[in-house]
Image (spheres, grey):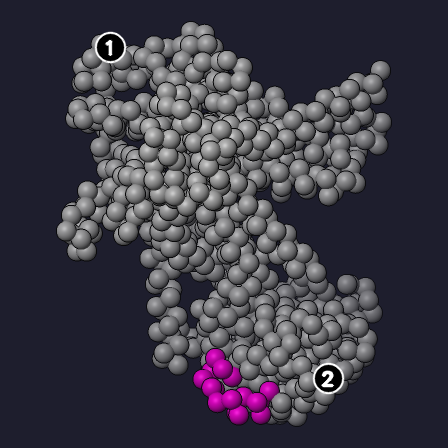
């Protein structure tokens, strides 16, 4: 009896320890970045582009990278949505009775979701070479769009599936065409679409490997699609590889900025998901 | 008119769907096509088993990079699996609803943190930890930049994935089945060990397979901490050079050395194929599992 | 009701979340008899049954007050040993839930947990319980086959054998025949009747005819309260309470 109780206690403690480690790792990461980055946070970081000698510790900020990242992530999310919404609607509403096919399509998107961003980056690079595009904002947007399409399709698909079948049937029985029904469903899932946008934007803004080959880097804010654009993760990466302490420190501050942006987006998405699921139950 | 609109839109959607799905095929073909110049010179077997990496002499041996990937991934799984398994068990089987409501969002937040931040954390926290406190107990000297560092960072990155899959699987186990074991006088841990884990085994395997494929492809965070030395690691404190890091680190020069671009695309192709295989395997296990639950 | 009660429930209240599931339950379950708990669905029958072996403990947001005395010992006392209490009672749930292992291991599961390791002892135990539930002749040649290969009716009898193998004093049945075909149902019912020589049996059922066939006593529960408790014939044929009358006539269901 005693041995069994000890065994229970032992494994229960192990579980608590594991949970503390896994849950605590989040605080460890955010805490580390905050402690190291906060001392280097200045207003200039957010509002100025790199001045001359920025990379040897002179003045400037990373506005170029912040704006660049917003452009890339924003452009990719918009482009991705334009492609993903029709796809999600098609899988759910235009394939009645072909369950095998729609499930195969879903599986394909799951696999695409699993393809690492470095492969999308390499493939995006191949597309650019093929069409003769230089490393630019456009190139970055193309590669990141490929990356976010599976995220968007999967999320939208899940959201559409929460719409009660009765509602769709009701619309159809009133003589609506499938497209008119799709419009009804789209109106229903507006918060879900917003969630998908946030998830995709959060992923897009934080990814390095896909923009490494494709977006290039520049100290200026891009003014056209064909100019190279800096991105926040890349700026962090470059500043960190510098031997100058001041530059490294600003790398940590940049990391802090990115963390705050992404956490904000993730928390917003979490809240939305919760609201949405409550709404449906 | 309305029907015509419906028909046109339906065709348009079909095109979009097919186009985005065929991405899978197009990526594979594109990468293969660009690997052909390299493949004409040496065979698949030579490329993956040779350890000589001298791009300037046209020698491309991928063995060290494949081993680097395997080491880092292996370490990550060894660290992450037990931690995540116990965490998932705690969340599903023990934690009160209130604790669950606090815990689960943090796991989700962790999954939202971008890879580069994990890399920064690795450099700031894990590297000094290994260099000053762990390595000195085992080896004479280590910079800290090692496959161990890569493995630890990667382990933390795959926590959310493994925890969420395993918890989901654990939740599908009927309460009555656990009650049956409990009502025979088994303790909760005995019930978990003999009933829940046994039932969840296929799900756990799936989680591991998916985590491996995720870990294989992770680039920037690993690149920042694992040393990037093109030799086969002999211990966890040796530096390693995983495939994704190879691609990311050398894109700058790839157009200036002959065959180099082809070699990097081949590396991407290798990753693509491995990950495709692992994803398909996990999918097969999952569908089998679902069928079993229904039947 | 002259003999000492086996389970004695005193002022039991169960809340789950904001819901008051069981309201001031007082009842004495007689020893070595079959007692059926009847009532409309959602009235708290199953909750009452599960409170007897503390299976409610793991429910989220549950609050239990009052006493449940088993052999005079309060199972909700702070120092009560849960596994020991549960071992005293075999549970037979609505659908059979064989553990994910072989037929043999299912029956041997409980004894093994409680420290019996000797192969010979286990063999005897398994054979004895499978014979007690009439399963031995049907499965003796395939004891190592997975338990899920058995028919539903056989699985339910296996679950009963599994429960008996730990040597309980009480058998709790939670609508144990609701998933079974008529033949298996009557086998299980006959088993209950023959088992009451050695065990006290508490059944939850919503089939009045079944309650009448197998039970000695009947408890009628409605909206979390005990309305009436007495010998089977009395409660079913000449109920004292208005609610019981209506339920028995089929007005409330």
Residue at 77% in and 68% down: C247
Where residue B71 appears, as percent x and y from the top left, is: 36, 49
Cα distance, mark 1 to mark 2? Answer: 87 Å
Magenta segment? C111-126
Residue at 30% in and 48% down: B233
Q: Does dot 2 land on a helix, a strand or a loop?
A: helix
Work out which residue is located at the far top of the displayed protein and give it.
A223
* Residue A150 part of the magenta-drawn span: no
Q: Which mark is residue A51?
A: 1
Dominant secondary structure (helix, strand or loop) of the stretch shown in magenta: helix
Say whether marks 1 and 2 touch (CB < 8 Å): no
Residue picked out by circle 2: C138
Where residue C11 appears, as percent x and y from the top left, is: 53, 72
Where residue C17 appears, as percent x and y from the top left, is: 53, 55
Q: Chain of mark 2?
A: C
| Residues packed near mark 1 inside 10 Å, few (<14), some (14 to 19) or many (20 plus) | some
Quick check: C96 left or right of B212?
right
| Residues packed near mark 2 inside 10 Å, few (<14), some (14 to 19) or many (20 plus) | few
The reply to whether residue B274 is visible in this rendering is yes
Q: Is residue B46 above or below residue B177?
A: above
Residue at 68% in and 42% down: A103
The reply to whether residue B110 is visible in this rendering is no
């Amino acid at each position: 009896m005693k041995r069994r109780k000890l065994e229970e206690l032992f494994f229960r403690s192990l579980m608590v320890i594991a949970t503390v480690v896994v849950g605590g790792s989040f605080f460890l990461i955010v805490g580390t970045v905050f402690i190291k980055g906060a001392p280097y946070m200045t207003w200039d970081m957010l509002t100025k582009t790199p001045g001359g000698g920025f990379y040897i510790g002179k003045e400037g900020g990373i506005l170029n990278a912040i704006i660049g990242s917003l452009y890339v992530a924003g452009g990719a999310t918009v482009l991705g949505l334009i492609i993903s919404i029709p796809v999600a609607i098609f899988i759910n509403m235009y394939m009645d009775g072909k369950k095998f096919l729609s499930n195969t399509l879903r599986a394909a998107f799951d696999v695409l979701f699993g393809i690492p961003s470095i492969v999308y980056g390499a493939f995006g690079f191949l597309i650019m070479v093929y069409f003769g595009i230089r490393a630019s904002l456009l190139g970055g947007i193309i590669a990141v769009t490929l990356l976010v399409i599976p995220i968007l399709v999967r999320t939208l698909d899940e959201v559409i599936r929460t719409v009660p079948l009765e509602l769709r049937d009701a619309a159809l029985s009133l003589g609506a065409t499938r497209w008119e029904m799709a419009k009804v469903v789209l109106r229903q899932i507006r918060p879900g679409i917003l969630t998908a946008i946030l998830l995709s934007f959060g992923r897009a803004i934080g990814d390095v490997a896909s923009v490494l080959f494709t977006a290039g880097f520049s100290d200026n804010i891009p003014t056209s699609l064909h100019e190279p654009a800096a991105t926040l993760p890349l700026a962090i990466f470059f500043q960190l590889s510098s031997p100058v302490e001041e530059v490294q420190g600003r790398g940590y501050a940049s990391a802090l900025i990115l963390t705050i942006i992404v956490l904000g987006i993730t928390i917003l998405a979490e809240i939305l998901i919760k609201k949405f699921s409550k709404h449906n139950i | 008119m309305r029907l015509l609109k419906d028909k046109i839109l339906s065709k348009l959607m079909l095109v979009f769907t097919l186009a985005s799905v065929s991405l899978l095929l197009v990526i594979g073909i594109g990468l293969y096509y660009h690997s052909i110049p390299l493949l004409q010179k040496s065979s698949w077997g030579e490329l993956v088993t040779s350890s000589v990496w001298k791009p300037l002499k046209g020698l491309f041996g991928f063995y060290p990079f494949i081993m680097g990937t395997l080491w880092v991934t292996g370490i990550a799984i060894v660290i992450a699996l037990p931690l995540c398994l116990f965490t998932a068990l705690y969340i599903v089987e023990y934690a009160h609803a209130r604790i669950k409501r606090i815990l689960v969002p943090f796991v989700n937040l962790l999954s939202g943190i971008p890879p580069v931040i994990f890399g920064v954390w690795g450099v700031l926290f894990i590297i000094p930890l290994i260099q000053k406190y762990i390595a000195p107990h085992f080896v004479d000297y280590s910079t800290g930049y090692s496959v161990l560092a890569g493995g630890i960072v990667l382990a933390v990155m795959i926590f959310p994935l493994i925890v969420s899959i395993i918890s989901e699987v654990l939740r599908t186990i009927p309460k009555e089945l656990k009650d049956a074991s409990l009502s025979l006088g088994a303790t909760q841990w005995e019930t978990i060990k003999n009933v829940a884990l046994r039932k969840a085994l296929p799900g756990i395997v799936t989680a591991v397979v998916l985590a491996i494929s995720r870990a294989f492809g992770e680039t920037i965070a690993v690149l920042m901490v694992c040393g990037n030395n093109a030799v086969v690691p002999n211990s966890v404190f040796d530096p390693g050079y995983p495939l994704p890091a190879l691609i990311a680190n050398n894109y700058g020069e790839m157009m200036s050395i002959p065959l180099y671009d082809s070699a990097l695309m081949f590396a991407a192709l290798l990753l693509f194929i491995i990950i495709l295989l692992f994803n398909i395997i996990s999918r097969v296990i999952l569908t089998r599992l679902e069928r079993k639950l229904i039947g | 009701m002259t003999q000492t009660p086996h389970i004695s429930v005193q002022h039991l209240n169960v809340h789950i979340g904001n819901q008051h599931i069981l309201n001031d339950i007082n009842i004495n379950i007689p020893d070595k008899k079959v007692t059926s708990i009847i009532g409309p669905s959602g009235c708290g029958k199953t909750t009452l049954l599960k409170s007897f072996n503390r299976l409610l403990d793991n429910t989220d947001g549950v609050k239990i007050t009052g006493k449940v005395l088993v052999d005079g010992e309060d199972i909700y006392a702070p120092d009560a040993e849960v596994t020991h209490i549960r071992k005293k009672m075999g549970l037979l749930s609505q659908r059979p839930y064989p553990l994910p292992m072989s037929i043999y291991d299912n029956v041997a599961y409980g004894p093994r947990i409680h420290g019996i390791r000797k192969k010979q002892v286990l063999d005897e135990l398994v054979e004895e319980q499978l014979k007690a539930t009439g399963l031995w002749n049907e499965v003796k040649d395939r004891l190592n086959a997975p338990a899920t290969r058995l028919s539903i009716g056989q699985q339910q009898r296996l679950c009963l054998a599994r429960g008996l193998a730990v040597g309980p004093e009480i058998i709790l049945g939670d609508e144990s025949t609701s998933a079974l075909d008529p033949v298996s149902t009557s086998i299980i019912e006959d088993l209950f009747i023959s088992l009451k020589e050695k065990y006290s049996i508490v059944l939850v059922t919503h089939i009045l005819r079944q309650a009448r066939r197998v039970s000695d006593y009947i408890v009628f529960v409605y909206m979390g309260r005990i309305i009436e408790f007495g010998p089977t014939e009395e409660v079913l044929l000449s109920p004292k309470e208005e609610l019981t009358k209506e339920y028995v006539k089929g007005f409330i269901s």
